[in-house]
Image (cartoon, rainbow, N blue to C red):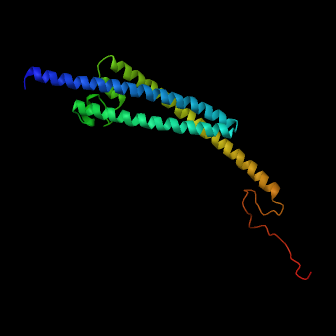
Amino acid sequence: MSKAQARTDAEVVAGAAGATLDALDGVMQQLLAEHEGLLALAVEHRRAISQADLPAMDACMSRQQALFARITELEIRRQGLVQALRTQAGESVKALAGAAGSTTARVTITVIAQRAAEPIRSRLTEVGKKLREVLNRLHVEHAAIREAAETLSSHMEGVMRQVCRQLSHAGTYGPRAAIDTRTQVVSALDVRS
């Protein structure tokens, strides 16, 4: 193979990698937008829980499922693009990660960005950083949602116990709104009349 042919092959691979990197940047931008939408929805969901607004909670859950479906689709596309980049580079995961100074065999966006040329390097680095920040904020927001949901659940359980106590004239329900087996219900049936 001549030097000119080798250069041409390298340029073809670089061009294919460039198109793949551009596609990866686009997918990462979409992932960022979807996660930002998920963050805004999480704030709305927490508000609905704090107001015990069941229709609003239901609407949030439906929208959340749609967002999760889109994020899953984008994540599958992202993984395919990363695999394509590895194939185009002709490197194993360990070699690609090791070349970027990583001690694990994972190929992250940071690892890919380090190997890319400008301006894609800056774009991938920036979108990766922003996505990490949004994911961290989402983690905090989802913890707050979990706490609010647990509080609402405890409140509703307490209300149900009070209702059961008020409606249990025979005293058959104990303090936990369960049938109390210690309580005897005395009843009689007159069979002579």
**Residue at the top extreme, as displayed:** 119
Tell whether 128 sits left or right of 18. Answer: right
Give the x, y percent position of residue 183: 78, 67
Choose between 27 and 118: the one closer to the eye.
27
Question: In the rendered image, is residue 97 in sight?
Answer: no
Q: Tell me where residue 127 sits by quadrant.
A: top left
Tell whether 152 sits left or right of 86. Answer: right
Image vertical order of residue 16 relative to residue 185, above or below: above
The C terminus lies in which quarter of the figure?
bottom right
The N terminus lies in which quarter of the figure?
top left
Q: Tell me where residue 173 sits by quadrant.
A: bottom right
Image vertical order of residue 49 relative to residue 100, above or below: below
Choose between 178 and 45: the one closer to the eye.
45
Tell whether 173 sits left or right of 70. Answer: right
Give the x, y percent position of residue 24: 35, 27
Give the x, y percent position of residue 62: 57, 39
**Residue at the right extreme, as displayed:** 193
Which residue appears at 34% of the width and 20% of the height?
120
The number of discs equals 0
Question: In the rendered image, is residue 46 in sight?
Answer: yes
Which residue appears at 68% of the width and 36% of the height?
50
Tell whether 120 sits left or right of 55. Answer: left
Which residue appears at 47% of the width and 38% of the height?
69
**Residue at the bottom extreme, as displayed:** 192
Give the x, y percent position of residue 64: 55, 37
